[in-house]
Image (cartoon, rainbow, N blue to C red):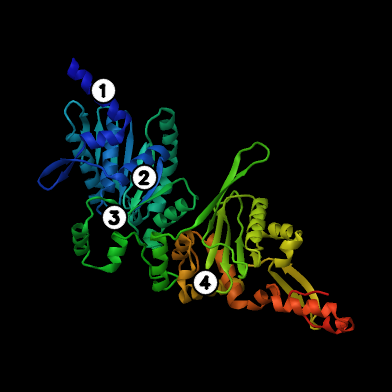
């Protein structure tokens, strides 16, 4: 009786804490036999993230036990909860079979008093007596949307997602039913979620879906919470382990960068040159120091949250510097964010960045905020679509109007016929934006400081298209102005101190009769 009570208490402790269960009762197969599974910090953090957030995407190094911890978590889930349905999607049949077998082996090596009985067991499928089931599969390339058809998945794992062909079509096929199953699981307090795991691959082609999901998670565009796990976080990954992995990869630096160092691969149709791409990878893997300022936007009527935004500051304002500010605006209901990029005009070094899901008037407030912080500036908001309303509102502010980017047209006599505020992206300017982005990065990629902007740039193909481009476009406007319209920069800069002194002396002198002559000369920063 005492022994039964002890087992019952252990079962309760295990059900309440998956990490406790895994560390005390799960065994994994190693050469020579089975050994207890001792989790390390990043593995525990991943389990906790899944428990709390449910939807997780992981960028990981190879052979550091991330698939193994997910297998152990599945064992916990199926053992202590009834009617759990798990789906495992791998890049091919052998890998999905291997995943299922390892999960079954963990169950078979539990203590007898805790071990559930199998009701059904095949290479890729098994069912327990408590009606919890696991289905492992690969994508049927002839009919991608057929995978997991008719299955109401409580928990889904997409393993090595960056290497699964036709994953986009497969995902669109099973995700509606999966999300409905999650609603039921939440109501019944059963663990649920989706874990997308992968080492990096190309940013276009077969790896594009995973890359897009990863970037979207980093920017808060989708439901997934991002987690990066580098081999250095694994306690067993010492120099000897690292050297063995490099030998297995034949000391191929590209493979080492991809499989171990979490670097995405530049595809044959990448927009940027390899040198620029390589530098941006360093920013992604080793983000530079920054100060952040988070924003929350509320509905004035009911107090509900409309959206979120974040400022990142890489360098504080310098009163002796002049700045270019590019703005790309998007609908608060669309998939893209409104973005603001700030660069030093002389060096084109990135100093600040904003990305947020908000209304037009919120973007207007953010523009006024940043222009008051980086005072000496030329402000260039994109005027297309939603930008039209933004620019119309900005024109009403005298201080903002003075620093707005303007397109001025004159007749053959030099008389101004029209003034349009805002930067227009069209068939003439967009190719030049692409050119400006390419050469700005080629000349000095260290100008970029933002991890999010770096990831967007890495995702561009030769047609200057990518999964996400809102930060790229805001930056590209600044690069375009610097490269092709430096005259507008010069006419926007405030007068130098010696020029101010000259005009002060002029007006205090007896030379006022010369003003009529002076009016015929256009002098930047001065009006009569």
Q: Nearer the viewer, mark 4 or mark 2?
A: 4
Q: Is residue 268 left or right of residue 250?
A: right
**Residue at the image point whose x is 68% and y is 73% from the top:** 493
Quarter placement of the N terminus:
top left
Residue contact at pointers 4 and 1, CB within 8 angstroms: no
Question: Which mark is first along the chain, 2 or 1?
Answer: 1
Q: Could you tell me residue 26's position as x and y percent?
A: 21, 37
In this rendered view, identify the residue nearer to me: 428 or 39.
39
Distance between the Cα atoms at labels 3 and 2? Answer: 22 Å
Name the quadrant containing residue 328. Answer: bottom right
Give the residue number, with chain letter if any, for mark 3.
232
The residue beneath circle 2 is 195
**On the image, numbered disc 1 is attached to which residue?**
9
Q: Nearer the viewer, mark 4 or mark 1?
A: 1
Q: Give the CA separation, mark 4 to mark 2.
A: 35 Å
Q: Residue, x 21% and y 21% (percent of image)? A: 6
Assign a secondary structure to mark 2.
strand
Q: Report the disc number at residue 437.
A: 4
């Amino acid at each position: 009786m005492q022994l039964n009570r002890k087992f019952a208490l252990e079962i309760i402790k295990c059900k309440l804490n998956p990490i406790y269960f895994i560390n005390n009762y799960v065994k994994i197969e190693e050469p020579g036999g089975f050994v207890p599974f001792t989790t390390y910090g990043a593995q525990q953090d991943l389990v906790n993230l899944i428990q709390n957030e449910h939807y997780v995407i992981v960028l990981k190094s190879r052979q550091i036990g991330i698939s193994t911890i997910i297998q152990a978590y599945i064992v916990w889930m199926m053992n202590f909860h009834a009617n759990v349905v798990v789906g495992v999607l791998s890049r091919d049949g052998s890998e999905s079979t291997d995943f299922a077998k390892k999960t079954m082996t963990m169950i078979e090596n539990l203590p007898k008093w805790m071990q559930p009985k199998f009701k059904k067991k095949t290479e890729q499928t098994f069912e327990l007596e408590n009606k919890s089931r696991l289905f492992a599969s690969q994508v049927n390339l002839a009919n991608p949307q057929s995978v997991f058809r008719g299955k109401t998945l409580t928990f889904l794992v997409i393993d090595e997602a960056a290497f699964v062909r036709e994953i986009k079509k497969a995902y669109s096929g099973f995700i509606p039913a999966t999300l409905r199953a999650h609603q039921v699981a939440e109501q019944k307090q059963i663990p649920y979620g989706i874990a997308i795991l992968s080492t990096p691959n190309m940013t276009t082609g077969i790896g594009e879906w995973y890359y897009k999901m990863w970037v979207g998670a980093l920017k808060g565009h989708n439901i997934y919470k991002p987690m990066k796990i580098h081999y250095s976080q694994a306690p067993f990954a010492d120099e000897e382990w690292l050297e063995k992995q490099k030998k297995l990869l034949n000391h191929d630096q590209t493979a080492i960068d991809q499989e171990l160092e979490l670097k995405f691969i530049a595809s044959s149709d990448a927009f940027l040159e390899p040198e620029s791409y390589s530098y941006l990878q360093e920013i992604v893997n080793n983000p530079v120091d920054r100060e952040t300022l988070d924003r929350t936007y509320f509905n004035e009527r009911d107090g509900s949250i409309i959206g979120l935004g974040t400022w990142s500051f890489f360098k504080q304002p310098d009163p002796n510097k002049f700045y270019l500010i590019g703005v790309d605006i998007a609908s608060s209901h669309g998939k893209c964010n409104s973005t603001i990029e700030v660069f030093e005009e002389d060096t084109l070094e990135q100093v600040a960045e904003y990305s947020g899901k908000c209304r037009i008037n919120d973007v207007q407030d953010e523009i006024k905020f940043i222009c008051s912080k980086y005072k000496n500036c030329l402000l260039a908001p994109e005027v297309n679509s939603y930008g039209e309303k933004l620019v119309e509102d900005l024109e009403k502010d005298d201080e903002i109007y003075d620093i707005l980017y303007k397109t001025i047209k004159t007749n053959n006599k030099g008389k101004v016929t029209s003034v349009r505020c805002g930067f227009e992206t069209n068939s003439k300017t967009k190719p030049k934006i692409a050119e400006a982005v390419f050469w700005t990065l080629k000349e000095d990629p260290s100008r970029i400081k933002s991890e999010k902007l770096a990831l967007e740039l890495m995702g561009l193909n030769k047609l200057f298209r990518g999964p996400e481009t809102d930060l790229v476009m805001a930056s590209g406007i600044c690069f375009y102005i610097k490269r092709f319209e430096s005259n507008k920069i010069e006419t926007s800069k405030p007068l130098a101190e010696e020029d101010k002194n000259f005009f002060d002396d002029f007006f205090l002198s007896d030379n006022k009769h010369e003003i009529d002559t002076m009016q015929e000369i256009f002098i930047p920063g001065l009006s009569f």
